[in-house]
Amino acid sequence: MNYWLMKSEADCYSIDDLKRDKKTSWTGVRNYQARNFMRDNMQLDDLILFYHSGGTKTEPTGVYGVAKITSKSKPDETQFDKKSEYFEPRATKENAVWFCPEISFVKKFKNPVTLSDIKFENSLSGIMVAQKGSRLSVQPVSEKHFRIIEEMNQK
DNA sequence: GCCAACGTTGGC
DNA sequence: GCCAACGTTGGC
């Protein structure tokens, strides 16, 4: 069982969108490190901290809820679509380049755990998302850190 | 909107 | 394989 943090811009695809859709294929990630995590390390039922980047005054950057892996990674269909902004000319059906899991809504946090909350909490020191310049959109999270953030949303 | 940090591209 | 130039991410 692994734990993850996945970023999305709220006005692009938010936790509320996931709540409405119940599940979605996590398409469009075009970073090799993130791909390798999704393709090689994500297991069924792994839990995900759903993070909104690019926050605003009223909706600050931070963790807004929890999702889980409900299907292991498969080829990302958008790489085969010539009209998609995610089209990948090197990809063939036999040799896909990009992969994505299906994720499902678990819950929306009562109170979002903002990035500044995360940076302030000593027991979360070392967490990747709080590192300066950490742009990776799919990150591993330790079980301990996952539990701490989950508990912080109750307060 | 700004800009630092990072990843990718492509010439050599 | 190196590295400069470029494009993107994401916090502020």
Image (cartoon, coloured by chain):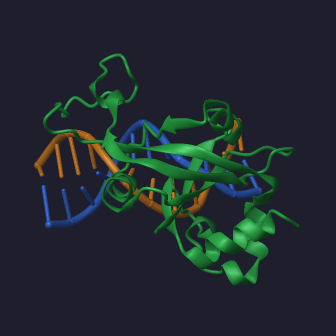
Chain colours: A green, B orange, C blue
Quarter of the image for residue A117 reads bottom right
Number of marks drawn: 0
Q: Position of residue A42 (x, y in %)?
A: 40, 58
Above or below, A116 relative to A82: below
Q: Is residue A124 above or below residue A7?
A: below
Q: Is A58 placed above or below A79 here?
A: below
Tell whether A146 sits left or right of A3. right
Q: Residue B9's spot in the image, x, y percent?
A: 26, 40
| Residue A145 x %, y % | 63, 75
Judge whether A61 appears above or below A149 on screen.
above
- In the depicted view, which residue is nearer to us: A73 or A14? A73
Point 27% across, 26% down: residue: A80
Query: A32 left or right of C10?
Result: left
Q: A2 left or right of A95?
A: right
Residue shown at 35% from the left, 16% from the top: A83
Looking at the image, the residue that sits furthest to the top is A83
Residue at x-position 36% and y-position 28%: A78
Can residue A124 be seen here? The reply is yes
Location of residue A122 in the rendering, given as x and y in whole percent from the top left corner = 74, 83
Residue A136, can we see it? no
Q: Quadrant of the C terminus of chain A?
A: bottom right
As rendered, which of C10 and A70 lies closer to the eye?
A70
